[in-house]
Amino acid sequence: MFKSKIPSITKEYRPELNGLRALAVILVLLFHLDITWMQGGFLGVDVFLVVSGYFISKNILYGLQNNSFSFKKFYTKRLRRLFPALIFTLILVIVAGYFFFTPSSYERLGKSAIFASFSLSNFFFWSEAGYFNLESTYKPLLHMWSLSLEEQFYLFWPLLLVILYKFKKQNLHFFILLIAIASIALGEIYISNNPSAVFFLIPFRMFEFLLGASCIWLEQYFFKRKTYILESLFLLGLVLIVYSAVAFDHFTRMPGILSLVPCIGTMFIIVAGKAPSLSWVLKNKLVETIGKASYSIYLIHWPIIVYYKYWTLSELSPSTQIIIGITSIIAGILMWHFVENTFRYRKSKKLKIDPIWFTVPALILIISSFSLFIWKSEGDTSRFTDELYMTKTEILENRKNYWKESSSKNTILNGKERKGHVLIFGNSHAIDLIYALRQNGLEAKITSLQTSGKCFNFGKAFQEKDNSFCANKKKKNLLNKNWGLVDAIYLHDHWPKLDLENLREIIKSIRKLSDAPIYVFGPKMIYKEQVPEIIRSSNSVSAAAINKFADQFEQKKLKLTINQKLLEEFKSPYYREANVNYIDILTLQGGEDYDSFDIVSEDNLQFLYFDASHLTKRGSKRLGKKLKSEHPSLFNIKETE
């Protein structure tokens, strides 16, 4: 089987393989609709890749056997088959983004559209957050990664297959399997250290295409087998695919060895697809139609889901899942009928060169040029009023120099005590405090000790794997000799959770090093979504309406619970005697009733948050003004030589 001549290949229509495509796209659709029992539905892509490897390899070998293969014909068919629907989708997504997206999101879309235009989406998303990252929810071209993967396969596989056919015909199946094994092994080697590369890049996905190609030889082996063997293989193939989609999830170590489960299931259906009693499951008219339109359904379904989630900023309810699922299938079928088929089968007999070779590059050039404009214009900021838009430059200006400026103005005491110094202890959120103090008249020099985002409450890890890192960070910070040389100590955190025991331990450790007054700053309001996106989704130019709209995205219950426990904790006589003070930030932000939290200023619509949790300089200045009014002692420290 591994060292055998290539079987005689005939062209035939196999409706059950369109049914297999239908199964694949339905799995992906259910996964993207957040169906809880379909956490492995993304493996529908693996099914697609195996089927593609089979069809493409079989068509090339058929042409080689009949002396009819030409690269020109092959790539003309690929252009007509893939690019009209792809270009149509890109245009729809870019136009929709103009109306739906904020400039920052539209800018990212422009950049990703450039890569999608040139079939490089997998490289783009490899360089960004992973496929399963929460941020990926709002990337309408994320699904293009797999199409780019296929298009890259189509670029080099025909040439390699032709070379192997001409020089290693008798060993062709052996070489195909050898490359497939090497691809799997490569993935297993790199998946621990670079899982994103293994997921997105073709060297690690090559085996799935080649397992499909291998079915050409396996068909010959199983062709004359008894019916019950074919029926068993077909049923087992379905079970393996469905089992993978239900039992696996994004925590499963894939792609790699475990990817063989759905891939082998797909191979079984390909080689036993003509099983008389069971193949009807994939041959009925509805399934066959969905299979024929599977490419268009795949293209259109994800943008529909993304734009719905983006506009509503809500999860998909069961009724919404059904509506979007049906809408995606209908839209895909319409696109298949009016776009795919129109360009796929319309050919000019008068021209020597198919016009598709001119129209596709021209349209790609236009789309990529416009996408470049979107990217470089920071998402076309002219769409928004000045009041409701902070340019990317302004945003970066708000954040990029926080640590840099803090470090440049950070005083290194070098063991020398000098009056008028404040030590601020915290992570990136402490920078908000630094700017709140500086912009409202604090004249003291600041010495900052930076904690890490991996650690909570100045030393405890979020995850077990970071325990040693956080413990060492904590030890290093507590050994710092500056604790005893300053006039005041400000402890700051964004309080994602509460650990009073650890907080007490930190304060007692600091007290052994310094007699300076300690101020512990409580949590500020944090939001469930990015504030710029909330502002855009409010569809309002009224500050009051925007702030009211933002109420539903506040992490209010969590922050108020933590704040209340901290208020109770600091009623203990120990803290008063130890000169440790608690600063209630939530009350400063939201008032005594915690009902007036703002994300834009009432007077001039200025952004108060940079993202979901960090304040802009404007927001920091506003908070600092309230701090100075309620806690003037924070600002009374002045530098003296």
Image (cartoon, rainbow, N blue to C red):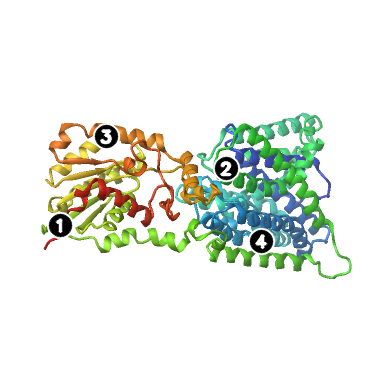
Query: Which residue is nearer to you in this view: 494 or 61?
Result: 494
CA gap between label 4 and label 1 equals 68 Å
Q: Of helix, strand and loop, which one carries label 4?
A: helix
Q: Which comes before the other along the chain, label 4 or label 2?
A: 4
Q: Is the C-beta separation of discs 4 and 2 under 8 Å?
A: no
Badge 3 marks a residue whose secondary structure is: helix
Using a 10 Å C-alpha cutoff, classify the residue at mark 2 as few (fewer than 14 neighbours), some (14 to 19) or many (20 or more).
Answer: few
Q: Disc 3 marks which residue?
A: 567
Q: Residue at x 63, y 62 (%)?
A: 118
Residue 420: give its label.
1
Residue flagged by tag 2: what amino acid is it?
Thr
218 w.r.t. 158: above or below: above
Q: Which mark is residue 501?
A: none
Decide if residue 7 is in sight here: no
Marks 3 and 4, how far apart in space? Answer: 65 Å
Q: Quadrant of the N terminus?
A: top right
Amino acid carrying mark 1 in the image: Gly
| Quarter of the rendering containing residue 397 | bottom left
Mark-to-mark CA distance, 4 and 2: 43 Å
- Please provide percent x and percent y for residue 37: 59, 31
In this rendering, the label closer to the viewer, 4 or 2: 2
